[in-house]
Image: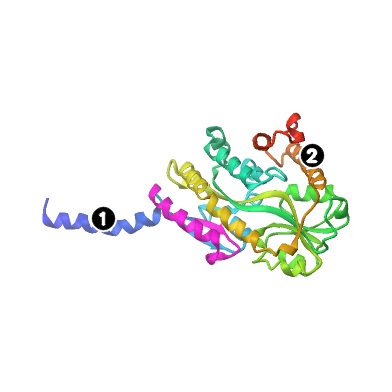
């Protein structure tokens, strides 16, 4: 081989290498209310660094508006997206059921459930639908009901009250109607202003939203946060599986399970920042009533196709495995 030919081959390789690098870069559009300075964006940046060892370069693109992130993914502007399970339910009903109302009462149950789901060979197939693969769950915390009047702390007292609810979530619409309240269509971008300005009497969010949404303004001196778990919120990482190397999905799920406790630390810190006086504790009897109501709602939403019964069944196993004395454990409704 002549010297000229050797140098020509080297030159071609140099010129083509940037093209190859660009071709293997995948963009994940990630919602974080804190944007580029948010805790979840920081965690996902570390995740992207690890993902670079799996045969692909991952770029995390921050979004402070969840709807825009989801729409950009749907339009093909992103190869992946990070958004709440309820926002992504139209892509995968199985993984979005992780946020089923009353499905997981505490963080220990949540961790067990996530671990079971991402390590089960059976569940792996169900986490992919029409090429959209859920490749990780990030805990965002227990969802609580926030009220502007702390005397509203039971189901009967919600009747006639205006509640900000996600208009794209069938479960929210169903639940608001079930308790006789009035639904005010909202999303994560509008809940704060509506609650703070008095356009609604109540809203539901997890603790990481409390400070960025300035919800203390809506609570004031008369409202509060009802300390009763409504659901477990998650950020779910979803990708177009065909755009990523073989094996990426399962490596991603395992990686994010390993980061579960770190993400949960953000949640617990946010809960600790809510003033003690803002919390509203309810009697055990009231909690039991809520639990029975939530079970009834889950069964009805399963039958209507909003929840996936297979995941609900595993949730019940987790709840009863941790507390066999629960009334539901002697039944077979889910």
Locate residue 266 relative to residue 46 in the image: left or right.
Answer: right
The residues colored magenta run: 28-54
Q: Which mark is residue 224?
A: none
Q: Position of residue 95 (x, y in %)?
A: 61, 43
Q: Position of residue 205 (x, y in %)?
A: 70, 57
What residue is at 51 percent from the left and 44 percent from the top? Answer: 253
**Helix, strand or loop status at disc 2:** helix
- Residue 203 appears in the picture as rendered: yes
Classify 10 Å Cα crowding around label 1: few (below 14), some (14-19), many (20 and above).
Answer: few
The C terminus: image quadrant: top right
- Does 82 sit above or below residue 33? above
Rendering colour mode = rainbow
What residue is at 52 percent from the left and 52 percent from the top? Answer: 80
- The residue at which mark 2 appears reads as 296
Q: Quadrant of residue 290?
A: top right
- The residue at which mark 1 appears reads as 13
Count of numbered circles in the view: 2
**Helix, strand or loop status at disc 1:** helix
- Does 281 sit above or below residue 290? below
- Residue 309 appears in the picture as rendered: no
Classify 10 Å Cα crowding around label 2: few (below 14), some (14-19), many (20 and above).
Answer: some
Depth check, front residue: 234 or 280: 280
What residue is at 68 percent from the left and 38 percent from the top? Answer: 319
- Is 84 in the magenta? no
Mostly what secondary structure, the magenta segment? helix
- Does 276 sit above or below residue 247? below
Depth check, front residue: 12 or 166: 166
Locate residue 34 relative to residue 174 in the image: left or right.
Answer: left
Nearer to us: label 1 or label 2: 2
- Does 126 sit above or below residue 9? above
């Amino acid at each position: 081989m002549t010297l000229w030919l050797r140098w020509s081959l080297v030159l071609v390789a140099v010129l083509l290498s940037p093209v190859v690098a660009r071709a293997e870069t995948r963009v994940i559009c990630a919602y974080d209310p804190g944007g580029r300075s948010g805790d979840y964006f920081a965690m996902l940046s570390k995740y992207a660094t690890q993902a670079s060892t799996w045969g692909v370069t991952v770029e995390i693109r921050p979004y402070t508006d969840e709807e825009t992130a989801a729409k950009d993914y749907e339009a093909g502007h992103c190869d992946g997206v990070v958004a709440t399970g309820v926002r992504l339910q139209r892509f995968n009903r199985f993984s979005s059921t992780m946020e089923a109302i009353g499905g997981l009462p505490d963080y220990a149950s949540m961790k067990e459930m996530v671990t079971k789901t991402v390590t089960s060979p059976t569940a792996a197939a169900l986490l992919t639908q029409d090429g959209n693969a859920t490749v990780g769950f990030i805990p965002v915390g227990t969802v609580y009901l926030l009220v502007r009047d702390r005397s509203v702390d039971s189901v009967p007292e919600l009747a006639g009250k205006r509640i900000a609810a996600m208009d794209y979530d069938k479960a929210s619409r169903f639940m608001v109607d079930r308790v006789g309240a009035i639904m005010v269509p909202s999303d994560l971008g509008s809940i704060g202003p509506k609650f703070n300005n008095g356009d609604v009497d109540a809203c539901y969010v997890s603790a990481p939203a409390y400070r960025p949404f300035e919800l203390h303004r809506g609570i004031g001196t008369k409202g509060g946060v009802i300390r009763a778990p409504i659901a477990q919120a998650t950020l779910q990482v979803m990708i177009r599986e065909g755009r990523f190397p073989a094996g990426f999905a399962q490596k991603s799920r395992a990686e994010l399970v390993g980061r579960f406790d770190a993400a949960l630390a953000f949640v617990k810190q946010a809960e600790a920042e809510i003033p003690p006086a803002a919390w509203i504790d309810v009697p055990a009897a009231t909690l039991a009533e809520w639990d029975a109501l939530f079970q009834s709602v889950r069964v009805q939403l399963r039958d209507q196709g909003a929840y996936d019964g297979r995941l609900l069944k595993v949730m019940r196993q987790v709840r009863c495995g941790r507390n066999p004395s629960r009334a539901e454990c002697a039944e077979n409704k889910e």
